[in-house]
Amino acid sequence: MASLNIGFIGLGNMGAPMAANLAKAGHKVRGFDVAGTTAEGVEQAQTIPDAVTGADVVITMLPNGSILRQVAAEAIGHMREGAVFIDCSTVDVESARNTSEAAEKAGLLAVDAPVSGGVGGAEAGTLTFMAGGSEAAFAAAAPLFEIMGQKAVHCGDAGAGQSAKICNNMILGATMIATCEAFALADKLGLDRQRMFDVVSTSSGYSWSMNAYCPAPGVGPKSPADNGYKPGFAAELMVKDLGLSQQAAELVDADTPMGARALELYKAFVEEEDGKGKDFSAMLPRFAGRGRGN
Ligand code: NAD
């Protein structure tokens, strides 16, 4: 494809390698981050208008919905009509819809496109994108998703990407907890962890948490459990995503008791116990060290 002018806002753990991959693919990328961070092959802009003026595409990779709204409010007015605004951050569904609406009102194409795959996926260019927006907006963004990722699913209208992401991660949080508490029960029943894995990973209790990211050290494929529970996917990020799914559930009056309980457990783990800075699979030693009374 022809070389595009891309403005990239938010060059953090995820954004920096994503922007670097776009530059490596031959696009002209101007990046801006309030922290002054930069990325390989990316020209450093001093302000948001400086990063987005004249851009064909603007991509944001920011911490939360309120920052996205602020950044979008500043960026959109400086973008040329017909340009594409792609937000790849994980944010609340309302902020995603609000941002798309503001962009479309200004004559832009807009896509909410949160990712899964983590920092490793961002570096390797193997992220999965879950996208919401019009057909035209998705078609315009798709070639860039191909550079930064290995799969992009068009989930529906504005906000549908965020909806898919938080539903997926609500399942992930709940299944990781179920997997960890089952291992802790198996321990106390005297069951060997490897045998537990051999059975569950090929039986109806199997899941990504068990089969691909086993929380028991030395069992199953290599995972953060084999590296002292260094993230990986930090428990704090799971608290964020479970919080977003509960916020969305309230908005649309959905009954999500497992998601609510998973949020409570991860929140306590991070805020009151020793979960901060650990991978979200470190729920296993947490459960293993407890009894029914605590
Ligand atoms: P990060 O904190 O490393 O990066 C965010 C960047 O945004 C920071 O560098 C910060 O300085 C910058 N920023 C904040 N306010 C800004 C502003 N007003 N203008 C310009 N830049 C600003 O976070 P991250 O790990 O890169 O995650 C980014 C997003 O991706 C989050 O929404 C996160 O939930 C999501 N996500 C992260 C992972 C992961 O494994 N890290 C995985 C999937 C999704």
Image (cartoon, grey):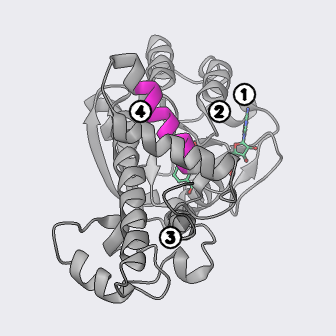
Residue 52 tag number: 2
Disc number placed over residue 279 in the picture, else none: none
Q: Which residue is mark 1?
A: 49
**Residue at 48% across, 40% down:** 242
User: At x 16% / y 67%, what residue is drawn?
Assistant: 204
The Cα atoms of the two marked residues, 3 and 2, are separated by 26 Å
Quadrant assignment, res 53: top right
Res. 214 visible in picture: yes
What predominant SS class does the magenta segment belong to?
Answer: helix
Numbered mark located on residue 111 in the image: 4
The extreme front residue here reads 293
In front: mark 3 or mark 2?
A: 3
Q: Is the residue 208 above or below the residue 177 in the image?
A: below
281 left or right, relative to 77 = left
Q: Residues within 10 Å of mark 3 (few under 14, many from 20)?
A: some
- Tell whether label 1 touches label 4 (CB within 8 Å): no
